[in-house]
Image (tube, grey):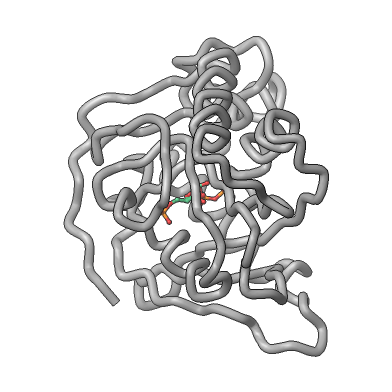
Amino acid sequence: MSIFQAPAISRDLPLTWDLFHRDTVSLARRLKDTGKRFRGIVAVSRGGLLPAGVLSQQLDVKLVDTVCMSSYSTDKKQHRLRCLKGVFHDGLGWLVVDDLADTGETIRALRKMLPKATFVTVYAKPLGKPWVDMYVKSLEQSMWVSFPWEREPGLPAEATEQETDRAREGEGQGQRNSNSNNNKKDSRESDKAGSAMEWPMRRPVLHQIARRVPWQQRKRGR
Ligand SMILES: O=P(O)(O)OC[C@H]1O[C@H](OP(=O)(O)OP(=O)(O)O)[C@H](O)[C@@H]1O
């Protein structure tokens, strides 16, 4: 497994719904220009759910499935990528959609599951680009992308993760955690113990890939 170097956070990219929508429609137009028709779309949950909805409309593809990926920290400070729900075909004729290819680890893992699929993302960073067939916008590796669905309605695009958490929890419950890295890590570790890990009941976990990137160095600059 590759070891990725630490990208320094230089600036954030706060995306609005409108900009995300326009970028995803651009992706759809480029896909249409290829003349390729897709029998179905696989959204990479969670970030791929939103672009998949837009592409489903734009490309008039009504068959939509998901693969559900989760990454979490281990005691050895490694990061593992786990497939909570996969699909059981080779991807022929399918379009796999995610919001962002950051280190490329997610798409790289999914290419093993769906070797014949076409992989697209709306945004791609340098380490992620080699793993996708098409993307719309290139981002610096150090950028932290704040997607609109990760914030609360009414908060500005520049809202921090802490501001989003406070808005979700309401007044009086105190600040959950002053460190946004820990916020995400906590939620991922709770994923590890959650009931979603029970899927699929009678099949082995499809992909367990060691993530050797220290959390602070990981995608979106978090
Ligand atoms: O190229 P990579 O380094 O693998 O990063 C890209 C992945 O990271 C994000 O998901 P995240 O792990 O934040 O999970 P989420 O979509 O459930 O929030 C994004 O939606 C991609 O799936």
122 w.r.t. 97: above or below: above
Q: Which residue shows up at 43% across the image and 20% down it?
A: 14
163 w.r.t. 98: above or below: above
Q: Which residue shows up at 62% across the image and 35% down it?
A: 51
Please tell me which residue lies in front, 71 or 120: 120
206 w.r.t. 196: above or below: below
Q: Quadrant of residue 153?
A: top right
85 w.r.t. 121: above or below: below
Residue 50 lies, in percent from the top left, at 66, 35
Q: Quadrant of the C terminus?
A: top left
Q: Quadrant of the N terminus?
A: bottom left
Please tell me which residue lies in front, 213 or 167: 213
Report whether 52 appears left or right of 61.
Answer: left
Report whether 63 appears left or right of 8.
Answer: right
Q: Which residue shows up at 33% across the image and 54% down it?
A: 103
Residue 45 lies, in percent from the top left, at 64, 51
Report whether 213 appears left or right of 150.
Answer: left
User: How many numbered discs sit on the rendered protein?
Assistant: 0
Q: Which residue shows up at 62% across the image and 74% down it?
A: 90
Q: Quadrant of residue 131?
A: bottom left
